């Protein structure tokens, strides 16, 4: 299997119609008709507003081995059929993601997720308290787990999530099986919180984007391993404190090193914008852009505020879109004001630290 990223001159990956033909799902006559349509249609990635026909089209596309971006409450995901190794290989190629970095499998409900992972008592408690929602559980894999090996990168654990976004849930129900989905950005870029962000990174590389407006949470799900003693692998949209309250223990944090990241994708320099970041700044210098939090100092250059009233939930929602916008301003460096570390602040500071790490 060829896992190299596609060469740019090759252009778009095969679209849904081509894949359905390959799968024998459409006849040459119907292809002729659809080719006639294609002559008048925009080539590349389709963007559809998230109504019922769009969700059905996305489910059909997944069944035919296609790649679709869809909204979750955290960030937009790039979905493929979790049981289709070939589609997953194309997903890694479209993102430019190393194949040793496993994917999260998304399920319609906790019941369906039981078929893939072995739920410990702690996992059962967390699933009951927080699913559907922004929590991913890493569990030992069920022996007959039907998720393609390539998506698991050879691990004997699986990352499982039941998203809360109504469009994601309707899509999972229409598709009728698990969907593997990393964030729908090019590998190493900032995660997308709108369809426009997805298009900017993946236009022509995926079949379809289901657009349901901006994501409410704005940072990725919190990842907790319950394969052994519960441990926090990635801070995210569900604050650590809420998890600790349910488990009645303080969560261990798996230490992050470049060689052996606890969540394999947590490389030090992830989520990087083009501009350099200067953290815990009091204000911006000439030539910089300013990402403010709370009361901002006067500044005449490009400035955006994560939350003028100092609200961490609002700040998480704005984090990736503000980083993208300030990056697009052309500033060489983005000065970032201090963000408190409690609640969603842990996830925000984690992403900022990675965005600022040397590359
Ligand atoms: O909010 C989210 O979690 C979004 C939406 C789309 O669901 N998804 C997301 O996926 O952020 P991704 O691929 O960008 O990040 C998933 C992280 C990666 O760091 C990966 O290494 C880790 O989960 N991961 C996946 N399987 C794992 C496993 N078995 N053990 C430890 N970490 C795992
Ligand atoms: Mg990601």
Image (spheres, rainbow, N blue to C red):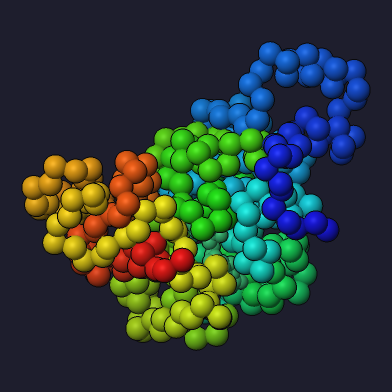
Q: Is residue 148 left or right of residue 190?
A: right
Q: Is residue 292 left or right of residue 112?
A: left
Give the residue at x 46% y 79%: 256
Query: Residue 188: x, y in percent?
Result: 51, 58
Query: Residue 196: x, y in percent?
Result: 46, 35
Query: Residue 298: x, y in percent?
Result: 8, 47
Q: Hey, which quadrant is residue 46 in on the image?
A: top right
Q: Is residue 206 left or right of residue 30?
A: left
Question: Compared with residue 91, is residue 199 higher up or lower down, i.e. above or below?
Answer: above
Q: Nearer the viewer, residue 119 or 62?
A: 62
Question: Compared with residue 195, is residue 282 higher up or lower down, i.e. above or below?
Answer: below
Give the residue at x 46% y 52%: 191
Question: Compared with residue 278, is residue 75 higher up or lower down, i.e. above or below?
Answer: above
Give the residue at x 32% y 41%: 329
Q: Nearer the viewer, residue 212 or 15?
A: 15
Q: Nearer the viewer, residue 10 or 130?
A: 10
């Amino acid at each position: 299997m060829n896992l190299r990223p596609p060469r740019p001159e090759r252009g778009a990956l095969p679209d849904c119609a081509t894949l359905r033909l390959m799968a024998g799902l459409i006849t040459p006559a119907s292809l002729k008709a659809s080719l006639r349509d294609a002559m008048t249609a925009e080539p590349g990635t389709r963007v559809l507003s998230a109504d019922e026909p769009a969700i059905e089209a996305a489910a059909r596309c997944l069944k035919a081995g296609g790649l679709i971006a869809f909204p979750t409450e955290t960030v937009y995901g790039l979905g493929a059929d979790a049981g289709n190794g070939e589609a997953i290989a194309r997903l890694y190629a479209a993102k430019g993601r190393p194949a040793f970095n496993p994917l999260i499998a998304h399920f319609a409900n906790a019941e369906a997720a039981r078929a893939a992972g072995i739920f410990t008592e702690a996992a059962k408690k967390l699933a009951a308290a927080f699913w559907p929602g922004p929590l991913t559980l890493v569990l030992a894999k069920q022996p007959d787990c039907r998720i393609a090996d390539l998506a698991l990168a050879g691990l004997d654990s699986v990352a499982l999530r039941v998203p809360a976004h109504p469009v994601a849930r309707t899509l999972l129900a229409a598709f009728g099986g698990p969907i593997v989905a990393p964030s729908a950005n090019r590998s190493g870029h900032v995660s997308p919180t709108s369809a426009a962000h997805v298009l900017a990174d993946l236009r022509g590389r995926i079949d379809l984007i289901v657009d349901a407006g901006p994501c409410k949470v704005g940072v990725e799900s919190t990842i907790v391993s319950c394969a052994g003693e519960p441990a926090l692998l990635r801070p995210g949209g569900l604050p650590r404190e809420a998890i600790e309250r349910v488990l009645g223990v303080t969560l261990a944090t798996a230490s992050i090193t470049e060689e052996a990241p606890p969540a394999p994708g947590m490389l030090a320099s992830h989520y990087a914008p083009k501009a350099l970041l200067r953290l815990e700044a009091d204000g911006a210098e000439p030539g910089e852009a300013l990402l403010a939090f709370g009361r901002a100092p006067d500044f005449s250059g490009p400035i955006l505020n994560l939350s003028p009233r100092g609200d961490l939930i609002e700040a998480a929602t704005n984090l990736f879109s503000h980083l993208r916008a300030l990056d697009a301003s052309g500033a060489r460096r983005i000065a970032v004001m201090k963000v408190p570390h409690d609640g969603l602040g842990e996830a925000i500071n984690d992403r900022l630290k990675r965005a600022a790490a040397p590359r």
